[in-house]
Image (spheres, rainbow, N blue to C red):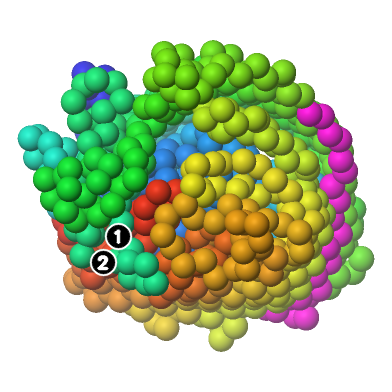
Amino acid sequence: MKSFKQTSLALAVSLACAMSAHAQDASSENTEAAQESGLERIVVTAQKRSQSIQEVPISIATLSGEQFENLFSGGGDILELAVRVPGLYAETSNGRVAPRFYIRGLGNTDFDLAASQPVSVIMDDVVMENVVLKSFPLFDIQQVEVIRGPQGTLFGRNTTAGIIKFDSVKPSEDFDAYVKSSYGTFNTFNIEAAVGGSIGEDLAGRFSVLSQNRDDYIDNTASPEGDAIGGFEELAWRGQLLYTPTDDLSILAKLHGRDLDGTASVFRANVFTRGSNDLNASYVRDEVIYDGNLNGNGFDNNPQEYEGFGGSFKVDYDMGDVTVTSITAYEEAEGFSLGDIDGGFGSLADFTPDPRPGIIPFDAVTQDNLDNLEQFTQEIRFASDTDEALSWQLGAFYFDSSFDITSTDGFFGATTVFHENTTWAVFGQATYEVSDKLTVTGGLRYTDDEKSLVVGDQNVNGFAVVIGAASIQDYAPVNVDDGQASFELSANYKLNDDVSLFARYSNGFRAQSIQARDVAFEGAPSVADAETINSIEAGFKADLLDNSLRLNAAIFAYEVDDIQLSAIGGANNGNSLLNADKGSAMGFEIDAQYLVSDNFVLTAGFSYNDTELEDADLLVAPCGANCTVLDPIVNGLAAVNGNPFPQAPETIFNFTARYSIPVGDDGELFAFTDWAFQGDTNLFLYESVEFQTDSNFEGGLRIGYENFADGYSIALFGRNITNEDNVKGAIDFNNLTGIVNEPRIIGIEAKISFY
């Protein structure tokens, strides 16, 4: 794949340079934009229409431009979005694939590749359902919308927590191109480039590419290789064609792909001391001590490889008073991740070349393969296009997905399971302008969701079978089917031209789930029934101080019936689905942006989430490691009634500041900093002293020069500039294993744009 990466990069750079001869001087336009006073109008499509964010009766936050791009200067992946928006969190135990998202505390800690999530990821109007599809790299992005709360009417099931919506830059007839490159710590080298414009009568195109690379920087001290873990090579690309033969018809075709060769999550054995959640002396940022050897190739060193490809075809046709939209999309992916799950070496400390890992009762190394993932979606939507008081849209949606998962354990062997999921839905939404001040919206959707699971080969060549410690199990196919309605009702009231109030009641559901992770360890497949959420929220949106201060806030409360949970860990490192009677939460979020002057901009956000599990009979296995469980123990199980949701930060605070100094008529010196703080977070369903975090924070800094006339910028940057060691996750089954954040990355970045 290296030759393909090099060819793609060369193509992007040569196209940009070749077409720069047609560039127009953008000096006056950019200078005016830089000096323009007042906050810009933000347009969102949270209701599948273009609307001002200040007019939509939903709590929404957006990221775009410098505020978004700075997050990825150091080669970060989609997890960089965690806590950068109030109420939004993300984590993973699967490296640069399979992120797990949480909004308002609601998410899913399941690490299985078939896991469903209550946060839906929408990329260019296409749902990315599988956890691997959700990890597609972010580049050439126009805007990110974080839409909080259930979105079951327009977007369907599995949106009970909300939506993260990504919109890439679309083709236009106007030529533009850019090349951006950065170099930093650990030989982190990134290139992002795009070129677009008219390529014929009524036809425009755009091609964009991203290459992210980092050397291995973590030394496996048990291996003679030296630096062996932590690096990655990732290439992603996107090609688009926009055909507009008439003013009434537009056709947008898109293809995209990715190729990842890197490191899975780095598990670190016994980095907590019993009775404390602080990292101890066993933790060294750039060292691990692994003996993982699943494939007989020496030290495996947690490799990860994934490939993906997909495309979509969107048609918009204006019939006069009605617009018809059709979106057809296809996605495919495959790959694997391997992990030394126990995070250390040998079964006892005496067997290791270094005593730091402590006691590890038994080795655990596993590999998960995702094969033959195929996803097909079709949506058709009819929307009114008039100036009448009543506007509406009606539509239908179809989804079909299938994939295979093979889990290989060093003791039990390999097990393959086959998943299929088919969904169809019909929906409608209407908005009525009661008066110049009051607008009401109502929506309804019916969804039918069907899933099936077939267990194929099990314990293939497993040592456990050979010695009689395990046997081949015979599991019947599992089929589940459910149909439910989702609905919402909201109102928006304008106090004046600058301030509006909104209220919203919404209902949604997460479809039933099937999970077969435990089959690899002779456990039966597990099933969770559908969960249903009812949510209320109210808030205000205001542009104040002559449009220099934007202040949006919302309070919310929700209750989830039959909330789906994943019981993870315990002595057997299990991963099974279950339902609790209820889960409830209440809280608020505030988003603020303040234009102090033409050269000084501040943004800030804060969220508070108070979540609680409500099930007096809910018992789960506590940690198999030597941790300090705080919950009551009943027959060896932890009673978790009243506990907070797992991986649900109680508070999130973030802010950014940008200050610039004009240089001549066409340039500026600038400094930009961004900081994010994460409050108390419980990692598992049960509570223990060791497996909870508090007061995590990270900061970024960027200092540079931008020239508007010549379209270039150069900057020094730093990510995690204070080099914080933040615990992001843990494994609890045979030792006190932790997962930490990425280290400090310092580098230089240059960008040149052509118009």
Residue 15 in sight? no
Discs 2, 1 touching: Cβ within 8 Å: yes
Give the vertical position of 441 relative to 265 (above or below).
Answer: below
In terms of secondary structure, what is the magenta stretch mainly? strand
The residue at the point 24 percent across, 76 percent down is 661
Query: Which residue carries the number 2 mark?
Result: 280
User: Dot 1, crowdedness within 10 Å: few (<14), some or many (≥20)?
Assistant: many
State how many labels appear: 2
Circle 1 sits on which residue?
Answer: 271
The correct choice, above or below, for 6 with respect to 96 in the image is above
Indicate the amino acid at tag 2.
Asn
Estimate how packed mark 2 is, as few (under 14), some (14 to 19) or many (20 or more) residues with alpha carbons within 10 Å: few
Task: Point out the residue furthest to the bottom here.
Answer: 545
Q: Secondary structure at mark 1?
A: loop
The span shown in magenta is 480-506
Write down the quadrant of residue 409 in the picture: top left
Q: Earlier in the sequence, mark 2 or mark 1?
A: 1
Residue 504 lies in magenta, yes or no? yes
- Give the side of residue 32 with respect to residue 459, left or right: left
- Residue at position x 41%, y 41% in the image: 94
